[in-house]
């Protein structure tokens, strides 16, 4: 698992206005991704195309959000992508299918 993501595993939060607009679970996932990407940006780590990204497999995401099932996590990410709040990329040189996430 990404070391920066690991730092934020034990404390999850959300903004009430985000939860009202996009739903509670997507708001929690979004807040988590924002925190990790901001930390990576501050340390100039995993910058691709001028943006900080975090690489997380579904296995990682299930560990980070043990109170959500895989479908809830996937649906939350899809909603965030559809709203233009999160980007999904692939930056592994070995053509691994693990997703990389950045926030807008």
Image (spheres, grey):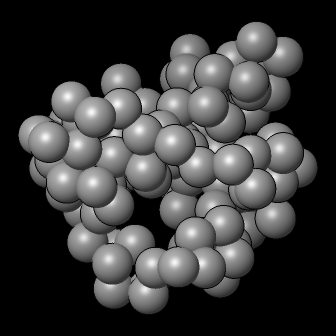
Residue 87 in the figure: left or right of residue 41:
left
**Can you give x and y, in whole percent of width and height, for residue 67 in the image?**
53, 79
Q: Quadrant of residue 74?
A: bottom left
Q: Quadrant of residue 6?
A: bottom right
Q: Is residue 62 above or below residue 35?
A: below
**Can you give x and y, in whole percent of width and height, for residue 38 in the image?**
63, 22
Residue 95 in the figure: left or right of residue 18:
right
Q: Is residue 45 above or below residue 61?
A: above
Residue found at x 52% / y 32%: 34
Residue found at x 76% / y 12%: 42
Residue 89 in the figure: left or right of residue 56:
left
Of residues 22 and 79, the one nearer the viewer is: 22
Residue found at x 11% / y 40%: 21
Q: Quadrant of the N terminus?
A: bottom right
Q: Quadrant of the C terminus?
A: top left
Residue 90 appears in view: yes
**Can you give x and y, in whole percent of width and height, for residue 50 in the image?**
56, 16
* Outermost residue, front side: 16
Q: Is residue 86 above or below residue 67?
A: above
Residue 98 appears in view: no
């Amino acid at each position: 698992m990404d070391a920066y993501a690991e730092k934020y595993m034990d404390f999850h939060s959300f903004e009430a206005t985000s939860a009202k607009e996009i739903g509670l679970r997507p708001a929690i996932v979004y807040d988590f991704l924002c925190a990790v990407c901001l930390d990576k940006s501050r340390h100039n780590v995993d910058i691709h195309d001028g943006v900080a990204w975090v690489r997380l497999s579904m296995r990682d995401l299930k560990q980070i959000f043990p109170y959500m099932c895989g479908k809830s996590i996937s649906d939350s990410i899809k909603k965030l992508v559809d709203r233009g709040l999160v980007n999904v990329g692939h930056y592994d040189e070995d053509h691994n299918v693990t997703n990389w996430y950045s926030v807008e």
